[in-house]
Amino acid sequence: MISHLTPVVAAVVVFAGSGTAQAASSRVPVPGTMVALGDSISAGYNGCGWYVACTSRSWSTGDHAPVDSHYRRLLRLDGGIRGHNTNLAAPGATSAGLMAQVRRAIELKPGYVTILIGAQDACVRTEREMTPVETYRRRLDDALAALRDGVPGVRVFVASIPDLRRLWQVGKGNGFARAFWAVGRICQTMLARPTSVKRADVERRDRVRERVMAYNREAAEACAALGEACRTDGGAVFGFRFTLDHISGWDYFHPNADGQRALARLTFPRGFDWADTR
């Protein structure tokens, strides 16, 4: 039990000590443009239709009023950002694709960039295919350094990866969820044989969760290296105890509009102290 708790404690310590989410700072001007980077979560995949990206529902750049995204919240502070909310997140993207997104973002010269990447690094067919932690960290370091150098003064927000084991917990008792996971072979490292209580399956789920926690620790440290230019959510997304009400009924994996709204609510207050120009 102690060995299983240790990674949790370590994650809390890293996030709490990183200074990226909690540090107080002077107010900063609302950016004139923002960009979302990452995977299907930030792309709003299955948020409003059958297996399609729905960027209007994105927690980051979405313009759908009920989601109340970062973009919508910034828009209320300063109308100058209106229409300058580009979503470059790609469904299925892993950390390997982050640099390509960064290069496209640099061309837009955004004042604000959000990043949520890593779920697909762990959600693969077998544990052996999961991205090594060292590789994930190197890719994050390279991407953040490129953003810093390519867009001097850019503000970056890094959201933590959701707890994949929580998804298994809330969905394993639902027949539709189990069917979608099996037919679509969704996140088999975590969701294969969802009703099994065999030791091998229990330990497999624990290892996948620990890999996600390791990614989150590395992302927090990479963000901290940028200093005041970067913030994290302090592990809020990972720690969120979501329910099936937050999950898309199209695949029982991605956030629906309610889930995207929860992501925006959890993350925005942990970011920058944007100046209110009203």
Image (cartoon, rainbow, N blue to C red):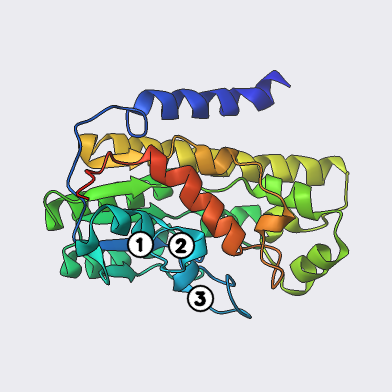
Do the numbered discs 1 and 2 sit on residues whose CB atoms are within 8 Å?
yes
**Badge 1: few (under 14), some or many (20 or more) residues near its Cα, within 10 Å?**
many
Place of residue 92 in the rendered image (x, y in percent of width and height, measured from the top left): 51, 69
Q: Is residue 139 left or right of residue 159?
A: left
Q: Nearer the viewer, residue 206 or 150?
A: 150
Q: Amino acid at mark 2?
A: Ser
Q: At 79% from the left edge and 64% from the top edge, which residue is drawn?
A: 177
| Alpha carbons under labels 1 and 3: distance apart | 13 Å
Q: Which mark is residue 53?
A: 3
* Labels 3 and 2: the sequence-earlier one: 2
Q: Is residue 227 above or below residue 60?
A: above
Q: Nearer the viewer, residue 68 or 115?
A: 68
Eyeballing the image, is 253 above or below 215?
below
| Residue furthest front in the image | 278
Residue type at mark 1? Ala
Give the residue number, with chain letter if any, for mark 2: 42
Q: Is residue 268 left or right of residue 126?
A: left
Label located before the other in sequence (1 or 3): 1
Q: Which residue is mark 1?
A: 36
